[in-house]
């Protein structure tokens, strides 16, 4: 059993990139993925979604990807020496011939030219997309595995709570069943005593049993109790499974709640009403926990 609440984070680094991946999940009826990542990672969105689907089947999944480029590894300095050489040569000719400058110092001009972006460029090399994809998917795989592990751990705790609730529900259902048998026997005695008071000592036994059977049938809850026993066994089996069972559990709890409501509507004794309230309370607690089961 897995919870739908989980968290995982991974940071990987190579020569050109550092990638930080953070994944958070909460409960949701379906698998709803929200990806927030830089444009460089957009071409790999489909592969990222596929990796997540392989591990997670339900829940709202928020994926955050942060990409940092290592500046020194992807940039080079490109000096346009032919242009500088041509400029300095032209400057020397013009200064000597036109302005009668006796001596031209190229070092002073060279210092200025090297600070000019037209002669010196910092070129960012195009990085290999294959390297980015490999690093990105590796980071996502590691992060989603950590999410899956955290969901398994949380799911184990939820299962322990559900097992306790299931045992409590089973015990109270058994008590309700035994009380119903006692109630029917007592009701039969009281019903017979009232008829004797009304009709005298001579009562048609066949008619008495017929009338009693009709009254008891209206309030008969044995069928509901039998179905509850089946549902309890199904619940126990679902709690032992390792694959996602959240939807099945949710449906089963609805069916159990329907049976309990029927018992409450068919029964008038206050003792049975009290059992119904207790059973409905336990089912509500189970339902709250099931909402977070994958």
Image: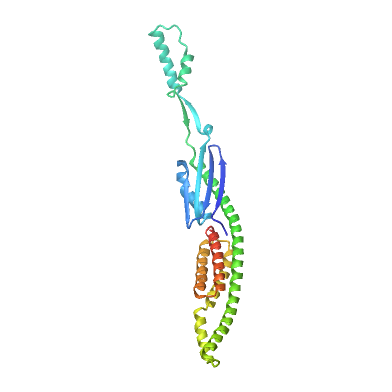
Residue at horizontal 56 percent and vertical 86 percent from the top: 193
Vertical relation: 72 (above or below) 287: above
Q: Nearer the viewer, residue 233 or 88?
A: 233
Where residue 197 appears, as percent x and y from the top left, is 54, 88
Work out whether residue 240 can be spotted: no
Instruction: State the scheme by which the image is colored.
Output: rainbow
Residue at horizontal 54 percent and vertical 66 percent from the top: 280
Placement of the N terminus among the 4 image quadrants: bottom right
Where residue 113 appears, as percent x and y from the top left, is 45, 19
The answer to which quarter of the image holds residue 275 is: bottom right
Q: Nearer the viewer, residue 281 or 100?
A: 281
The answer to which quarter of the image holds residue 96 is: top left
Work out whether residue 248 can be spotted: yes
Where residue 262 appears, as percent x and y from the top left, is 50, 72
Question: How many numbered marks, from 0 up?
Answer: 0
Q: Nearer the viewer, residue 27 or 131?
A: 27
- Single out the residue that lies furthest toward the bottom: 202
Vertical relation: 208 (above or below) 244: below
Q: Nearer the viewer, residue 81 or 257?
A: 257
Where residue 139 appears, as percent x and y from the top left, is 55, 45
Vertical relation: 168 (above or below) 24: below
């Amino acid at each position: 059993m897995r919870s739908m609440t989980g968290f995982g984070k991974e940071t990987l680094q190579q020569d050109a990139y550092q990638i930080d991946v953070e994944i958070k999940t909460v409960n949701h009826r379906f698998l709803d993925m929200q990806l927030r990542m830089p444009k460089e990672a957009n071409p790999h969105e489909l592969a990222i979604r596929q990796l997540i689907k392989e591990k997670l089947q339900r829940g709202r999944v928020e994926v955050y990807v942060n990409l940092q480029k290592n500046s020194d590894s992807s940039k080079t300095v490109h000096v346009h020496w032919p242009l500088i050489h041509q400029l300095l040569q032209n400057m020397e000719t013009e200064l000597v011939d036109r302005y009668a400058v006796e001596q031209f110092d190229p070092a002073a001009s060279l210092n200025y030219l090297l600070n000019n972006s037209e002669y010196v460029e910092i070129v960012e090399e195009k990085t290999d997309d294959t390297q980015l994809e490999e690093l990105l998917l590796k980071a996502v795989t590691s992060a989603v595995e950590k999410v899956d592990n955290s969901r398994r751990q949380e799911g184990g705790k939820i299962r322990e709570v559900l097992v306790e609730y299931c045992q409590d529900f089973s015990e109270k259902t058994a008590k309700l069943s035994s009380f119903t048998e006692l109630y029917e026997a007592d009701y039969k005695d009281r019903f017979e005593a009232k008829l004797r008071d009304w009709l005298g000592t001579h009562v048609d036994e066949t008619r008495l049993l017929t009338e009693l059977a009709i009254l008891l049938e209206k309030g008969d809850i044995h069928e509901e109790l039998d179905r509850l026993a089946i549902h309890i066994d199904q619940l126990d089996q679902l709690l032992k499974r390792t694959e996602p069972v959240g939807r099945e559990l949710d449906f089963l709890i609805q069916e159990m709640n329907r049976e309990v409501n029927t018992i409450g509507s068919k029964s008038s004794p206050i003792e049975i009403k009290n059992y119904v309230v207790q059973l409905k309370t336990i089912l509500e607690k189970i339902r709250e926990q099931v909402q977070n089961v994958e």
